[in-house]
Amino acid sequence: MELRGILQGLTHEYHGGDKPVDYYLNIGEDRLPLNEWLGSELTISFLGEKNCIACGRKTNKTFNSGYCYPCFTKLPENDLCIVKPHECHFDLGTCRDESFGERYCMIPHFVYLAVSSDIKVGLTRKHNELRRWVDQGAIRAIPIAELPTRRMAGELEFHLSQFLPDKTNWRKMLKGDVKEIDLLAMRDEVYGHFPEQFKAFQYREDEWVDIAYPILESLDKINSKTLDKEEQLGGRLIGVKAQYLIFDNGVFQTRKHAGYQVEIKAKPSA
């Protein structure tokens, strides 16, 4: 099997229960069903060209996972407030695209607890939580607050980050080095840190989500592989988690390589 085109990244389908997430590697208009190729040899070759995932223009360097510099500086999805939502400036009238802000920011958001390597606090748009949790490699997660806007969710998350991590240790996440944590007990503990103005937004559903990933075996050592250093990489595909392909000789972060022109070859192992 061979595919050529612009690497778009991973998409997935979550089925719940003990069934692993179904992953697809998107190249141009095609997609490779990765679960079907677990245990097979997969090779990724860089064809020497990068294209912006927004406007399609050729670029020598990509920014923020696949954008050319003009799109990086102009598009609202690349504004600083996306990664620092407590600094949202929509109300100041300086949003890069007001219609974008209305669709993605001035809508309900969850603040949540997730377990990927350790417990972490995060936020996401309501109804986008499963996608967000899978993208982070979480094995368990639960919403703890529902806020009417992204900025309010960001303010609460920023406050709670004084007491909890808001980042994932990606190496531990990929190795499956995860602590056992009672999410409901942790949620109740975290509620004690809520500022008074946020207590009315506590979300008290007692059901959490468990997420399983398609992984045949674990790596003892995480070696990151990149097409910026190797024009061709790959190996036996032993798993997929978050935005990573896990090979028997290292891991490949797909989102970092969005916009790269690549050739993908897959063949069953002998």
Image: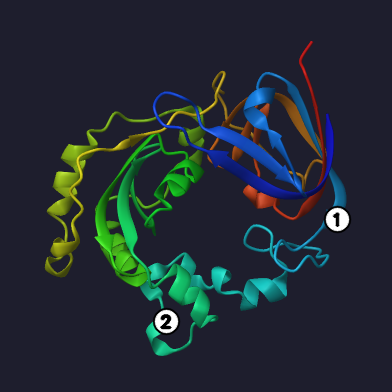
At label 2, the amino acid type is: Phe
Q: Residue furthest top?
A: 270
Image quarter of residue 62: bottom right
Tell me where residue 52 appears, x and y as whole percent. Answer: 74, 63
Of labels 1 and 2, earlier in sequence is 1
Secondary structure of the residue carrying tag 1 is strand
Residue at the disc numbered 1: 49
Say how the picture is coloured. rainbow
Is residue 221 left or right of 111 when viewed as pictured? Answer: right
**Placement of the C terminus among the 4 image quadrants:** top right
Q: Which mark is residue 90?
A: 2
Tell me where residue 263 appears, x and y as whole percent. Answer: 84, 40
- How many numbered callouts? 2
Q: Residue at x 54, y 81 (%)?
A: 96
Give the Cα distance between marks 1 and 2.
36 Å
Q: Is residue 89 above or below residue 230?
A: below
Q: Residue at x 31, y 64 (%)?
A: 153
Q: How busy is the neighbourhood of tag 2: few (under 14 within 10 Å), some, or many (20 plus)?
A: some
Secondary structure of the residue carrying tag 2 is helix
175 or 44: nearer the viewer: 44
**Placement of the N terminus among the 4 image quadrants:** top right
Q: Is residue 157 above or below residue 215?
A: below
Q: Residue at x 14, y 45 (%)?
A: 188
Q: Which mark is residue 246?
A: none
Q: Is residue 156 above or below residue 48?
A: below
Q: Is residue 21 visible?
A: yes
Q: Is residue 147 above or below residue 168?
A: below
Q: Nearer the viewer, mark 1 or mark 2?
A: 2
Is residue 111 left or right of 75 when viewed as pictured? Answer: left
Q: Is residue 248 visible?
A: no
